[in-house]
């Protein structure tokens, strides 16, 4: 399935449905994509039993915030905020509240950036969603928040690779987020059939990475999180970097040889037909190759249409920078409401 990157830079992103005439052929292609993806990112180990410790409880004006920590494989523990709706403003449905895993962008504050009023403008989506009646779990990703390695800056993944030389932070994050889903599913307040994932940038691609391997995710929102190799002026950011952060070490050798083992619209296709919402900005200085992003979104929309689920895919490209603007968040929240709140009816 490998591609010559310089050729793709001339011809464009490869069509998802090329040489696919029926559902069986698509399933075989999808199996190949999944196999290649897992080969490059590494194992997804058996998860730890759910064990939640509450460190603090804070009554906010419009919700309750629990500072918790829960177990993960290999003896790791994940700190997070669990946000619970105000039952007076948002009465609990008989089946439980819908829930969202809110994955933060690249910022040293981690979960605080999306789940507290100290967060940056246009990043506090965890807060906004609990106010809409969602239970929200906002964990710290490894290398951020309370999980920054001692004597290292945030998003320095070197110590991780010293401990796990054959693994990847991508697989580590997926593993941790699957553990977060276990936590949400264990809560009596939550409707386990109505769980979504949302994120911006780093949190954006981690949302669809997770949904591609865990069908407990019923809807995803990714803001400025789709970054194909094709057209990217710096595709090496997906491979090995001494600093700040290495995503998939194994892909570096391919990039040096002018090839890629997969393209990221194929990885996003692992989600299909899970309802998926994507946003990108034409003035994005981090992921500037918006034309390739648009091509990838078009291929995904064609796939959803071909599968018979055209209404489950939405993508938008704005003229703005690497951001999650208010009007786009409004569209994203309405999208989540459509696919998650429907479980309450």
Image: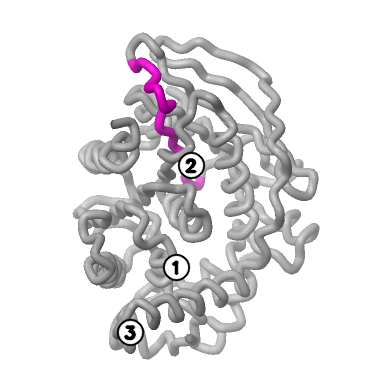
How many neighbours does mark 1 have within 10 angstroms: few (below 14), some (14-19), or many (20 or more)?
A: many
Give the crowd class for mark 2: few <14, some 14-19, many >=20 residues within 10 Å. Answer: many
Residue at 31%, 40% in the rendered image: 336
Residue 13 to residue 268: above or below: below
Q: Label 3, label 2: how many angstroms apart (C-alpha)?
A: 36 Å
Q: What's drawn in magenta, residue-wise?
A: 90-106
Which callout, 3 or 2, points to the residue nearer the camera?
3
Residue 49 in the figure: left or right of residue 249? right
Snapshot quadrant of residue 149: top right
Q: Residue at x 44, y 65 (%)?
A: 270
In magenta stretch: residue 105 = yes
Give the residue at mark 2.
104
Tell me residue 300's x, y (percent): 30, 67
The residue that mark 1 highlights is 267
| Residue indicated by mark 3 | 20
Residue 248 in the image: above or below residue 252: above
């Amino acid at each position: 399935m490998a591609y010559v990157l310089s050729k793709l830079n001339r011809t464009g992103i490869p069509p998802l449905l090329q040489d696919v005439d029926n559902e069986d052929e698509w399933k075989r292609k999808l199996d190949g994509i999944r196999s290649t993806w897992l080969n490059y990112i590494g194992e997804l180990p058996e998860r730890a039993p759910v064990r939640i410790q509450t460190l603090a409880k804070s009554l906010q004006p419009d919700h309750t915030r629990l500072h918790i920590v829960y177990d993960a494989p290999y003896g790791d523990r994940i700190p997070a905020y669990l946000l619970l709706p105000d039952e007076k403003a948002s009465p609990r449905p008989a089946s439980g509240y819908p829930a969202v895993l809110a994955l933060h962008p690249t910022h040293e504050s981690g979960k605080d950036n999306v789940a507290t009023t100290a967060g940056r403008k246009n990043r506090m989506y965890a807060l906004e969603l609990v106010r809409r009646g969602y239970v929200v779990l906002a964990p710290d990703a490894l290398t951020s928040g309370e999980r920054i390695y001692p004597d290292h800056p945030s998003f320095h993944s070197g110590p991780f690779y010293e401990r796990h030389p054959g693994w990847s932070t991508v697989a580590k994050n997926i593993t941790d987020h699957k553990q977060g889903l276990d936590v949400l599913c264990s809560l009596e307040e939550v409707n386990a059939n109505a769980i979504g994932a949302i994120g911006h940038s780093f949190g954006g691609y981690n949302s669809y990475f997770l949904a591609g391997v865990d069908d407990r995710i019923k809807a995803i929102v990714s803001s400025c999180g789709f970054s194909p190799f094709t057209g990217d002026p710096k595709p090496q950011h997906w491979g090995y970097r001494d600093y700040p952060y290495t995503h998939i070490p194994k892909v570096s050798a391919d990039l040096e040889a002018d090839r890629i083992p997969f393209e990221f619209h194929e990885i996003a296709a692992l989600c299909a037909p899970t309802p998926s919402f994507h946003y990108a900005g034409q003035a994005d200085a981090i992921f500037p190759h918006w034309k390739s992003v648009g091509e990838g979104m078009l291929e995904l929309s064609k796939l959803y249409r071909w599968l018979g689920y055209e209404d489950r895919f939405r993508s938008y490209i704005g003229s703005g920078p690497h951001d999650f603007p208010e009007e786009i968040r409004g569209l994203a929240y309405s999208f989540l409401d459509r696919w998650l709140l429907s479980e309450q009816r």
